[in-house]
Image (cartoon, helix red, strand yellow):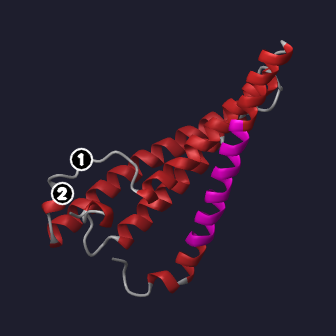
Amino acid sequence: MALPGTRTTWPFRIVGVVRNVVNVLVVIIFAYMVVAVILQVASRTLTWIPAGNAVETATFAQIWLTTLGAGLALRQGALFALDTVTRRLHGGIARALSLLIAAIGLGFIAVMIYGGVLLTMQGMAQNSPVLQLPMWTMFISIPIGMTLLGLEVIVHLIERWDDPFAAPVEEIA
């Protein structure tokens, strides 16, 4: 259950746009990764010409897919959770625990963003081995992905405020 009126307020419209952009990017990146791997395997099998560029770009696509996909996984309820006990909690105890979990999660995300920024700065002086791309273009995926994950944590907290640990509809028997 969402807070009253949250879907119509401008911050949630912006979140909707960001979510749509991330969805499109994840699909494009995944499609590219599949095509690059197929081309790389085909080039080795059919022509015996290695396609090192495809390997490196597929690896970079996988890095971006992983960091962007973390928020998407949270939104879809696909992240690992132990919720046998928490589903039995209701009211103030459930809300307090969900706030604590969100705070710990956001603390971890803040550390990841900080480390990602440091790594990105270090990557400005490095290039990838095959394509000689600046490595900051890969490392910046960490602060971007973690920022999006943090946004999803906050939105998840707000949307599920009434019953933070309710089972998803498909799990209710």
Q: Amino acid at mark 2?
A: Thr
Indicate left or right for 105 with 36 as reference. Answer: left
Front-most of residues 74 and 125: 74
User: CA–CA distance between discs 1 and 2?
Assistant: 8 Å
Q: Secondary structure at mark 2?
A: helix
Indicate left or right for 167 with 63 as reference. Answer: left
Q: Is residue 166 above or below residue 83?
A: below
Quarter occupied by residue 38: top right
- Residue at the location (61% across, 50% down)? 144
Q: Residue furthest front?
A: 46
Q: Is residue 16 covered in magenta?
A: yes
Q: Secondary structure at mark 1?
A: loop
Residue 82: assigned label: 1
- Residue at the location (61% across, 43% down)? 65
Q: Residues within 10 Å of mark 1 (few under 14, many from 20)?
A: few
Place of residue 13 in the rendered image (x, y in percent of width and height, measured from the top left): 58, 78
Quarter occupied by residue 34: top right
- Residue at the location (79% across, 20% down)? 52
Query: Label 2: which residue?
Result: 86
Q: Amino acid at mark 1?
A: Leu
Residue 68: assigned label: none
Place of residue 92 in the rendered image (x, y in percent of width and height, measured from the top left): 16, 71
Q: What's the magenta region?
A: 15-34
Indicate left or right for 58 with 43 as reference. Answer: left
- Answer whether labels 1 and 2 touch (C-beta < 8 Å): yes
Quadrant containing the N terminus is bottom left
Q: Is residue 22 covered in magenta?
A: yes
Q: Is residue 92 above or below residue 22?
A: below
| Residue 128 at least partly seen | no
